[in-house]
Amino acid sequence: MNTTNEIQKQEEYITKVKQINENKKCKYIILTMGCQLNENDSEKLCGIVEKMGYEKTEKQEEADLALFNTCCVRENAEEKLFGKIGELKNIKQSKELIIAIGGCMMQEKHMVDKIKQSYPFVDIIFGTHTLHKFPQDLYEALKTQKKISDIIDIDGEIYEGIPIKRNDNIKASVAIMNGCNNFCSYCIVPYVRGRERSREPRAIIEEIRELASKGYKEICLLGQNVNSYLRVEREKNIAFEEYEGINSFATLLEAINKIEGIERIRFISPHPKDFTDDVIEAIAKCDKVCKLIHLPLQSGNTKVLKEMNRKYTKEQYLSLVEKMKEKIPNLTLSTDIIVGFPGETEEEFEDTLDVVRKVKYEQVYMFIYSRRVGTKGDKMPNQVPEEVKHKRFEKLKQLVESQIAENNQKYIGTYQKVLVEGKSKNNSNMLTGRTDSNKVVIFEGKEELIGTMQDLKIISEHMWYLKGM
Ligand code: SAH
Ligand code: SF4
Ligand code: F3S
């Protein structure tokens, strides 16, 4: 069955579930545990279930359907998931409640086995490649009261036309590719998200045009390897339809830059190896592409990088930074770093600190290495003791925080373009927005400014936000 027919078939199931739920005022709760791609998948799940007549609630005791969209990139999500399912067991004893668990963790066989064994009351288990089939799975669970397990271990197709209920009306994320072919040795993502495959250019542009017509101002392009968009297709001669000259990530940025109404373009998460010259030029040239670029480092030591299978050395990374700084005016950088990868010595860790000192990142996402079953890293003999990992993490955190404090100073007195996102959560008299470099700016202003771009003078800094006027 082709993907369009499959989506039509699922539309029929949506109608069937809607009929079953008619006049019942059913409610659903959703917990999303992962990255922005998972959040985007959750927006699709919300779109699907709201079309079936479910209304969102934040109170689990009110829910008729509890949805979990899981992540397995690090260990900590597991405890959280099991705790939550445990809480729902009691609720399920007193009322009809469907519990459905999806997402990356469900692509891991040992996790599915554990759920089936320890939490047999879970109704539906679905994976990352079967999200589009959720209407059918839910229909069958409601109709037959059987336990449904719908997971496939293939690369999955790209399905267009899945309903979507977005969380925001100013910023929207748009998945442009799925999967990852890099197999960094610490990472589970390639195993749970399958191989790289890109969406058709036309589908992406049409989605963004529609978002622009609804008043969205900022687009965040998503992919586990976002800047290798269409690379596999080009290298393996997999057919795709060129649209508006789009045949690469660079040409995609250029095409989106022309869409009227869209004011900002971001993308996450790129890989350093795919910052080819055409991509760097496109970032420099396209005025709407934000000049904050995420450039995941992971480690600053060449030997560790090799063990991680990152495909660059410390020197190559630093020269890429230099080249980008030279070609892209006002460039700022953020990064991801893992401490305590197997075999990492104190000296090798110092290289990571060295790169952080040199690059002066705008933001650093720091992670303690977490063993993931099925990855090469998990099988490495020389695992770093927990307390050593934690010490390194603290050391890195201190350096990063001192750099952020220092970096914030440079904003004071400058004018920044701020996209106003809404009222401040902590102070309803204030509005909040973000700079091109993704810094939060709080300022006094009227509600009408929400959704507009404002030129603000930065008057003070407070570690995690700036104050403007
Ligand atoms: N595809 C993206 C994001 C992958 S997951 C990228 O390549 O950048 C996001 C981050 O989680 C990674 O960049 C890495 O820093 C971190 N991460 C992945 N696996 C991890 C593990 N086993 N332990 C600790 N951190 C990990
Ligand atoms: Fe994981 Fe590496 Fe792929 Fe990112 S590029 S998803 S870190 S394997
Ligand atoms: Fe987690 Fe899956 Fe994203 S493992 S980080 S939710 S791709």
Image (spheres, rainbow, N blue to C red):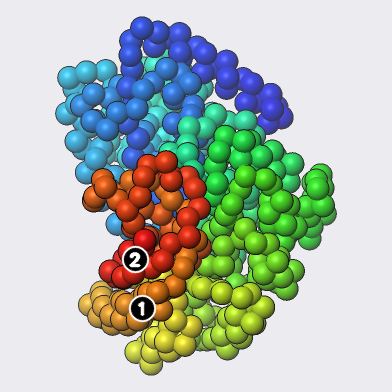
Q: Position of residue 461 (x, y in %)?
A: 31, 70
Question: Residue at label 2?
Answer: 466
Is residue 33 shown left or right of residue 36? left
Q: Residue at x 48, y 29 (%)?
A: 47
Q: Which mark is residue 409?
A: 1
Q: Position of residue 395 (x, y in %)?
A: 28, 82
CA–CA distance in space, label 1 to label 2:
10 Å
> What amino acid is at disc 2?
Leu
Q: Is residue 31 above or below residue 25?
A: below
Is residue 261 shown left or right of residue 276? left
Which quadrant of the structure image shows residue 340? bottom left
Q: Residues within 10 Å of mark 1 (few under 14, many from 20)?
A: some
Using the image as rendered, state which of residue 200 and residue 258 is in the foreground: 258
Q: Earlier in the sequence, mark 1 or mark 2?
A: 1
Is residue 231 shown left or right of residue 397? right
Q: Residue at x 37, y 42 (%)?
A: 447
Residue 217 visible in the current orientation: yes
